[in-house]
Image (cartoon, helix red, strand yellow):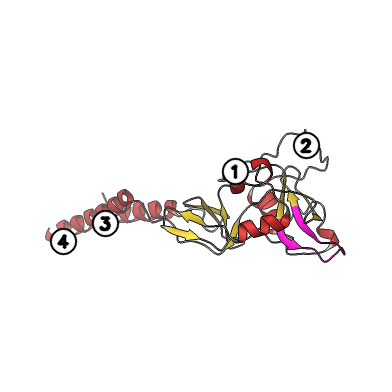
Amino acid sequence: MDRNLLSLSIAFFTAYLYMGSTQAALFDRGGGLIYDNVLDVTWLQDASYAETLGLGVQGSGKMNWVDADNWVSNLQFYDNIRDVTWNDWRMPATFIDEFNSIGFDETGQSSEMAYMYYVNLGFEANPSLDVNDPIPMSGNYNPFDNLQYRSYWSDTLTDLTTSARAWNLHFHFGYQNFTGILSDELNIWAVRDGDVSPVPLPPAILLMLSGLAILSMLRRDKKAQH
């Protein structure tokens, strides 16, 4: 193989491995963790982990906001890829505590869940608010499991009412609102700030790249002898 062609092949192969790093927003880090490089947060791949554990109302994973906040704040999640237990979880944040955040924020700028729904997952708003409608679909990359197409709590309490209420987003419709922290039981999606270390390249790929580099050097030396 021509040296220049070989070098180009290696470059293209390496680029392929990391393709999309500046375009896609979600990266599967392994160990049940999904990184969002725009919000710089890491989501649990299991979007209803409390249900998986059989917690909440009748094992549904749903809790009132106080219980949900307590549970997620004390969550210990073992990452079997990095042999680390992550314990700094929270519920998703709402950034804009204003009345105009109520409804369908198709820009995804008002909260982490709105960004997840409209931008990452590419779902569309459903103004009908009819639970009998088909669940939202999209061609976007969706690495998550156990997503409930119902309301999820935000960790953000609103200052817009005199009673204690917290923001939430309904994943069937993309509708955002606030509700009583004790009167309603909603789903919980755990998220943490920052990234975890990416999974290293598999040994087979590293071995192949090393072999190509050695082959290139051998061919170069052989040509130098002529």
User: What is the three-letter code of the residue carrying label 2?
Assistant: Val
Residue kind at label 4, given as amino acid type: Ala
Please name whichever residue, 157 or 106, is drawn nearer the observer in this view of the structure. Answer: 157
Position of the C terminus by quadrant: bottom left
Q: Sequence order check: which comes first, mark 1 or mark 4? A: 1
Look at mark 1 in the image and give the residue it sits on: 54
Residue identified by numbered label 3: 213
What residue did someone put label 4 on? 224
Amino acid type, callout 1: Gly
Dot 1: element: loop
Distance from the alpha carbon under mark 2 to that under mark 3: 57 Å
Neighbour class for label 3 at 10 Å: few (<14), some, many (≥20)? some
- The residue pinned by badge 2 equals 131
Please give the name of the residue rendered at 81% of the width and 55% of the height, measured from the top-left corner. 180
Tell me which corner region of the image, top left, top right, bottom left or bottom right, holds residue 37.
bottom right
- Where 194 falls versus 142 (above or below)? below
| Of the image marks 2 and 3, the number of the one nearer the N terminus | 2
Q: Is residue 47 visible?
A: no
3D distance between C-alphas at marks 2 and 1: 24 Å
Which of discs 1 and 3 lies nearer the camera? The answer is 1
In the picture as drawn, the residue positioned furthest to the bottom comes out as 159
**Which of pointers 2 and 1 lies earlier in the amino acid sequence?**
1
